[in-house]
Image (spheres, rainbow, N blue to C red):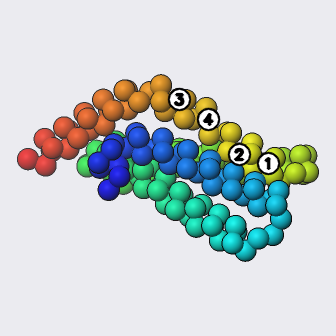
């Protein structure tokens, strides 16, 4: 609903910022130690922000794909979109071992979203135009 009302690009921006915030909550847990209440809040926030971001990303990819080849295009774009996350995740254990500090690790992961947000912000007009063209294309195809 949010993506429909405020736009997919804005949804992606808010989702990225929210996910960085949830990583900062994990950092907070690492600093203060075990707390069931903080853990519950962190898991709730993390699951909500992950779902929100996933919906924004799926909405973005769905609008970009054409109806004739939507499954193939969506699969390729989704794989490409998740490639960096899955590739970098394989080295996260090495980084934690090097840092020897989970709190700092989660702060770094929260900061890692900044380049993506800057890129998304700088390309927002391009993406908005691209999404508008895709909507017009879909309207013509459905007639």
The residue that mark 2 highlights is 109
Viewer-side residue, 57 vs 44: 44
The residue that mark 3 highlights is 119
How many angstroms separate mark 2 from mark 4 (CA)? 10 Å
Q: Residue at x 58, y 67 (%)?
A: 44
**Residue 66: percent from left, percent from top:** 28, 44
Q: Are marks 3 and 2 in contact (CB under 8 Å)?
A: no
The residue that mark 4 highlights is 114
The image quadrant of residue 43 is bottom right
Q: Quadrant of the N terminus?
A: bottom left
Q: Residue at x 72, y 58 (%)?
A: 26
Which one is earlier in the sequence, the residue at label 3 or at label 4?
Answer: 4
**Residue 81: percent from left, percent from top:** 53, 45
Label 3: few (<14), some or many (≥20) within 10 Å? few
Is residue 94 visible to the viewer in this orientation of the structure?
A: no
- What's the mark number on residue 105? 1
Q: Are marks 2 and 1 in contact (CB under 8 Å)?
A: yes
Q: Residue at x 15, y 44 (%)?
A: 139
Q: Are marks 3 and 4 in contact (CB under 8 Å)?
A: no
How many angstroms separate mark 2 from mark 1 (CA)? 6 Å
- What's the mark number on residue 115? none
Q: Which SS class for mark 1?
A: helix
Viewer-side residue, 76 vs 43: 43
**Residue 27: percent from left, percent from top:** 75, 54
Which one is earlier in the sequence, the residue at label 3 or at label 1?
Answer: 1
**Residue 39: percent from left, percent from top:** 70, 68
């Amino acid at each position: 609903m949010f993506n429909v009302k405020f736009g997919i690009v804005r949804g992606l921006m808010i989702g990225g910022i929210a996910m960085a915030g949830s990583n900062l909550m994990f950092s907070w847990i690492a600093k203060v130690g075990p707390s069931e209440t903080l853990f519950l809040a962190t898991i709730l926030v993390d699951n909500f922000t992950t779902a929100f971001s996933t919906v924004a990303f799926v909405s973005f990819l769905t609008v970009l794909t054409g109806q004739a080849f939507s499954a193939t295009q969506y699969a390729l774009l989704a794989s490409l979109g998740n490639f960096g996350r899955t590739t970098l995740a394989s080295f996260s254990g090495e980084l934690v071992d090097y840092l020897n500090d989970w709190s700092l690790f989660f702060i770094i992961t929260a900061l890692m979203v900044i380049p993506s947000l800057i890129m998304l912000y700088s390309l927002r007009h391009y993406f908005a135009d691209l999404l508008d063209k895709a909507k017009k294309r879909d309207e013509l195809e459905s007639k």
